[in-house]
Amino acid sequence: MSGEPRAVAAAPAVPAAPAVPAAPAPAQAESPLDSLKQLVPLFDLRLEQPDLDAVADTLRSGWLSMGPRTEAFEELFAAQLGTRHAVAVSSCTAALHLAYAAAGIGPGDEVIVPSYTFTATAAAVLYCGGTPVFADVIGDHDLSIDPAEVERLITPRTKAVVAVHFAGYAAPVDRLAALCAERELTLIEDAAHSPSATLHGRKLGTFGLAGAFSLFSNKVLSAGEGGLLVSDDERVATLARRLRTHAMTLTSWEKHNGAQGAYDVPALGYNYRIDEPRSALALSRLHRLEEEIDRRRQLTRRYRRELRSFTDVCVPFRDEQVDTSSCYVMPILLGDPARRDEIRRRLRQEHGIQTSILYPPVHRFSVYRERFPGVSLPRTEAASSREVTIPLFAHMTTVQQDRVLAALAQELSP
Ligand SMILES: Cc1ncc(COP(=O)(O)O)c(C=O)c1O
């Protein structure tokens, strides 16, 4: 599934228009004192002039629903990933739903999923009428789903296994793919965090029947909202293309381009369409994806180097994994979970550092607890209770990163 990127047809030309005024550059700290007044956000999005131009051109084109820019975005995304098909949709959740539907998940089927993830990974199993079965992570040093646990949880009802590449670091999808092949199960990758990340030189999202990516605001390739389903399987791609637009046999763009006649609705579909301004934005940003991931990797390496001297902090994953990760977020595990809330409060109020928790275990949320009581995942629960996500974004400055490190040093001292 590797290979040279294919040439991509440009979106049709639209009339030239006056340039959109450049966004003001974010204020840089002038002195250490000034910098303390500014929040270091968990994530920050910076759009550049070509992004604004691409969206403005799209708005001026008069065609805002799914159309040629979406096709161009899909083509470039598939080429960069080395997969045959990419189908752009309204969210990664929609992509997961369509991937599970393509895997034939239905009532009575079990799907083994991690709990150390966002709710959508499991919720989309329920949309299909299937049952999510939660598996534990490998451990503090690797927050991926544990293949040994997956194997232990397989029953005659198991139909699929879902891997999440948490924070952009590869889950052991090579081992999971082999296990799935042996047990005749379908592997799906929730690659929401991991565009362009790899395992053994192969892009994540291409190891199973289908992969799902997210374009949500805080993601590595963000466009506000949106997602993609990728697959090498023609049947999966055709189904996803149909179901994303009500399963209609003709799309509005095809009708606009002269397709005649009545359309049919041969299956129950959804409105999971993406729109042209978001596809144009994502396409424009896709050209800078590698550059931005490189910068994320540099920042992550520096965090990891500096955090080595912190005695009571565990930094998940291995240093060498950074080279092939998309470095979506920077998770750290504190020594004492009882101090976490107070440390996060002080980071925010005393130092202006925004943090988050990725993730509260999915099986502990009310909706899952009520449906699936008694699930116990000791490693997931222990890691999650100690986790703090610290700021990371491509244009984060050294000054900002120093502030995060200095605040942590102060607040984590015994
Ligand atoms: C692991 C994971 N899967 C799925 C999703 C859902 O993505 P979207 O918001 O694009 O539906 C997210 C979003 O945060 C996520 O982190």
Image (spheres, grey):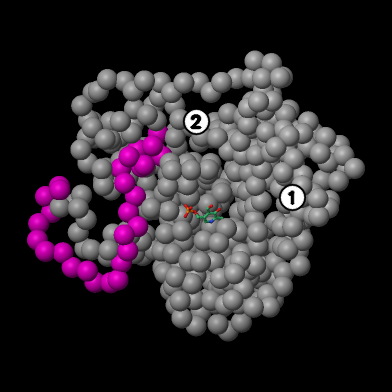
Q: Label 2's element?
A: loop
Q: Nearer the viewer, mark 1 or mark 2?
A: 1
Residue at 32%, 64% in the rendered image: 270
Q: Quick check: 184 left or right of 65? A: right
Q: Amino acid at mark 1?
A: Asp
- Residue 46's mark? 2
Relative image position of residue 300 (x, y in whole percent): 69, 37
Considering only vertical position in the picture, is 283 above or below 66? Answer: above
Q: Is residue 199 visible?
A: yes
Relative image position of residue 170 (x, y in whole percent): 63, 52
Q: Is residue 279 magenta?
A: yes
Q: Is the residue marked by circle 2 packed among few (<14), some (14-19), or many (20+) residues within 10 Å?
A: few
- Residue 341's mark? 1
Considering only vertical position in the picture, is 8 above or below 386? Answer: above
Residue at 42%, 69% in the rendered image: 101
Q: Label 1's element?
A: helix
Query: Farthest top residue?
Result: 30
Considering only vertical position in the picture, is 86 above or below 330? Answer: below
Q: Is residue 206 visible?
A: no
Nearer-N-terminus badge (1/2): 2
Relative image position of residue 355 (x, y in whole percent): 66, 43
Residue at 30%, 71% in the rendered image: 268
User: Magenta span covers which residues?
Assistant: 256-284
Task: Tell whether circle 2 marks a residue whose Cβ is less than 8 angstroms from ligand 1.
Answer: no
Query: Farthest right residue?
Result: 414
Relative image position of residue 163 (x, y in whole percent): 59, 61
Q: Quick check: 281 left or right of 257? A: right
- Residue 253's mark? none
